[in-house]
Image (cartoon, rainbow, N blue to C red):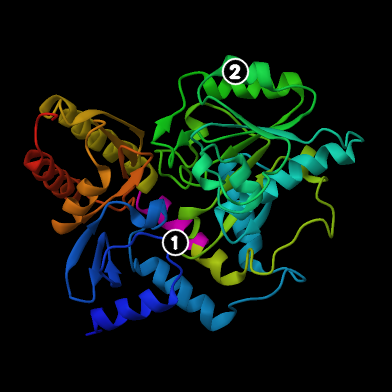
Amino acid sequence: MADTNALLALAGRHLLKTYKQPPLVMTRGEGCRLYDTEGRSYLDLYAGIAVCVLGHAHPALVRAIAEQAARLGHIANLYYNDKQIELAAQLCARTGMDRVFFTNSGTEANEGALKLARRWFFTQGDAERTDVVATWSSFHGRTLGSVAMTGTPKYWEGFGPRLPGVSQVKYGDLDAMRRRVNDRSAAVIIEPVQGEGGVFPAPPGYLQGLRALCDERGALLIVDEIQTGVGRSGKYLAVQHEGVVPDVLTVAKGLAGGVPIGAFLVRERHAEALAPGTHGSTFGGNPLACAAALAVLETLDREGLIEGAATKGAYFLSRLEGFAAKYPALVKGARGRGLLCGLVLADHVEAREVLGAMRDRGVLIAQAGDRVLRFAPPLIITEAELDEGLAALDAVLAALPQETK
């Protein structure tokens, strides 16, 4: 067994301190469980921030990775590879888009979408049309372009001048978008559910309204499905609940179940914006990552996991809503879509304290915004495992002071 203290000492000396990690070290996972160096078991209700859609060490994913690694792990995009082509075709069929560019992460997918939107207007002879409208409380990534679109100041403060031409309006406010989007706007970028910002689903009609507005003003609609895509909402894409087809779509996180991969997809009429030499990636779409993503798609279909995300998510959200009635001094409500749910805590309740207490009870969850507990479990999770997590949460809330000071 690994020496926990020795590993933590090494981490303290060599890792940048960009995360506030508890003093435990994970070594393996199985299904919806993680295990640390001390042999302790944890029920995983956040799945690496919505990444591990098949849980940990799923046999189909393990087999696909091993078989592909033994065949061809990496080849540059100077040549086609079979798995990349197969995955591109499947993604287009499932999303209604026409062409794909593969990246390594969600932030790179959003960077590519931003570059495509601006270059599209350049190719149309309108090089001054470069503005992008995003929303407050959004999250689109950590690189300078993506972080400029992110509508939470703490993510871009201290990194120098922000990318010019990018602005934010209130999420869900279609009138604010109408006032902002004009003939200088290259694109609007939106999350169907704001994940990092506090698990805010788009209000009814909002996404359709944005589609109509972009059509009217000639701007591209970029939909960021990095956290909500790959079945988490109960459909392959969250926008499919609303019948909306974007001009550009970004996906990542759960796409390959934990193997790093992202993608932006585009409709045919805008694909010519990125001609040969205008964009590239060394690792994006390599055979190993694409084989893993194909295994995820096959497993989602075979095990009915997308439909299960809808039914299990509705059950879980209803149970979370019950905590608002049971603990009115502690819980303001619950919201979400599919297996992406948030429990909104009262202002005086420290979310990090609740996370720590849940961890002590062997359940891992995450935080979104200042006062929201975020649940994004593997799509393979069972109702019994959801009940286990709910029981732990019930116990943690019951142990908190029930009245404000």
Q: Quadrant of the C terminus?
A: top left
Q: What residue do we see at 55% from left, 71% from top?
A: 288
Instruction: Give the residue type at disc 2.
Output: Ala
Which of pointers 1 and 2 indicates the residue nearer the eye?
A: 1
State which region is magenta: 293-304
Which x, y percent locates residue 254? 45, 54
Q: Quadrant of the N terminus?
A: bottom left
Q: Residues within 10 Å of mark 2 (few under 14, many from 20)?
A: some
- In the picture of the structure, the residue carrying the numbered disc 2 is 176
Is residue 266 one of those drawn in magenta?
Answer: no
Which x, y percent locates residue 74? 62, 76
Residue 92 vs residue 338: left or right? right
Q: Mark 1: which secondary structure? A: loop
Is residue 297 one of those drawn in magenta?
Answer: yes
Q: What residue do we see at 59% from left, 58% from top?
A: 87
- In the picture of the structure, the residue carrying the numbered disc 1 is 18
Residue 371 is marked as none
Residue 286 vs residue 28: left or right? right
**Residue 135 is at least partly visible in this image:** yes
| Contact between labelled residues 2 and 1, with CB atoms less than 8 Å apart | no
Q: What residue do we see at 37% from left, 75% from top?
A: 11
In the rendered image of this protein, does residue 364 appear above or below residue 177? below
Viewer-proximal residue among 214 and 22: 22
Which x, y percent locates residue 191? 52, 36
**Residue 53 is at least partly visible in this image:** no
Q: CA distance from mark 1 to mark 2?
A: 35 Å
